Image (cartoon, rainbow, N blue to C red):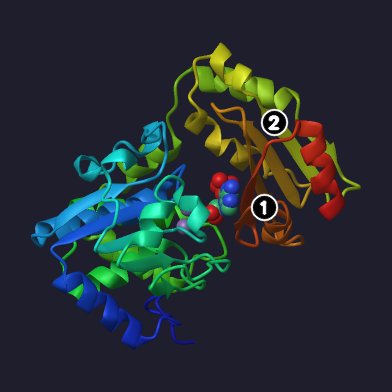
Amino acid sequence: MTPDLRGGGPVPVSDWDRAVGLISSADEIALACHISPDGDALGSMLALGLALRAAGKRVTASFGERRFRVPRLLRFLPGQELLAEPGDYPAVPELMITFDVPIVDRLGMLAGNALKARELIVVDHHPSNTGFGTLNLVDPAAAATAVLAEELLRRLGLPLDRAIATCLYAGLVTDTGSFRHSSTTSGVHLMAARLVATGLNPEEIARELWDRSPFGYLRVLGVVLDRVTLEPEVGEGLVWTFVTRADRVAYGLPYDEVEGIIDVIRRTDEADTAVILKEDDDGAWQVSTRSKGAVDVSRVATALGGGGHTKAAGFTSHLPVEQTMASLRALL
Ligand code: AMP
Ligand code: MN
Ligand code: MN
């Protein structure tokens, strides 16, 4: 078997060439990633931002949240100085590039800027990507947007340094679940090898992303696990729980600290599908769904107004927990 050396399969060479042309001829480039950024979204964006700035471009990078705040666990990523609040973002960018954004809504407050941009390059790996760019570098076979970001840097002739590689590595390990998910190909490991060769510290990155939290996290985890429910008769088995704003406030825990709890819930042998409903600071429920493969959770999440991948998807709900769960059970 020939190993797939790169993830950029289905993106036609002519599209890569157009992207290189647009980026090379631009002086000012506006970058954006999806709201509630994860390691792949923010890491891919900052990697491009650092490389483009080193190449002499003026770079603005942002994500469209009113309460603009980088999640605590991503603050170690190099390139934070490139970030601007969405209010300071170019209203009509000459060239805008989005990272890990499948639909224009996931740009939040920056959706309007994207629709007005003269050229919009969409770099993404979601199968559900709607192709909202003037140029779409979308490869659903890529394990992470970071895979496509690395390919773009290579085609631009921009070298990796340790800081850029740290950002890309954060994207790669986030979306492959530390090389555990089915997306972990030989190509993924070869990319990891290129990144590690720059001298980055995998131990430090893993600790920042997954192995530290404020003490209050343990208390909230206790509360959330105490109310976890197993419903073996629903679909291929469902395990679910929820975390309220009040749970977090009681222990001084910001919203992004509870993002990882789904990884505890989904280990349940008796359930194919795991769900956690997380109440954010605006009182909306951000719902994360995971499957071991029997159920396509992207179908379920899409039906409820969200999206994602077969085994990891999500949606936002403004209904009470029991009502959201009733809709979910009906779809499972
Ligand atoms: P999460 O559960 O937040 O880690 O998200 C898992 C996957 O679902 C990611 O690929 C997201 O892009 C997607 N996703 C999560 N929330 C939403 C949403 N509200 N709308 C669309 N897609 C979402
Ligand atoms: Mn993402
Ligand atoms: Mn991604």
Residue 25: image x %, image y %?
15, 73
The picture quadrant where one finds residue 8 is bottom left
Bin the neighbour count of mark 1 within 10 Å (Cα to Cα): few under 14, some 14-19, many 20 and up.
few
Q: Is residue 314 left or right of residue 27?
A: right
For mark 2, give the secondary structure.
Answer: strand
The residue located at (19%, 62%) in the rendering is 160
Q: Quadrant of the C terminus?
A: bottom right
- Residue placed under numbered mark 1 in the picture: 305
Query: Which of the numbered marks, if any, corresponds to residue 242?
Result: 2
x%, y% of residue 47? 26, 56
Amino acid type of the residue tagged 1 in the rendering: Gly
Q: Is mark 1 within 8 Å of ligand 1?
A: yes
**Residue placed farthest to the right in the image?**
233
Which residue is at the front of the view, 87 or 239? 87
Q: Is residue 111 above or below residue 227?
A: below
Determine the secondary structure under disc 1.
loop
Dot placed on the residue nearer the N-terminal end, 1 or 2? 2
Q: Between label 1 and label 2, give the one nearer the viewer.
A: 1
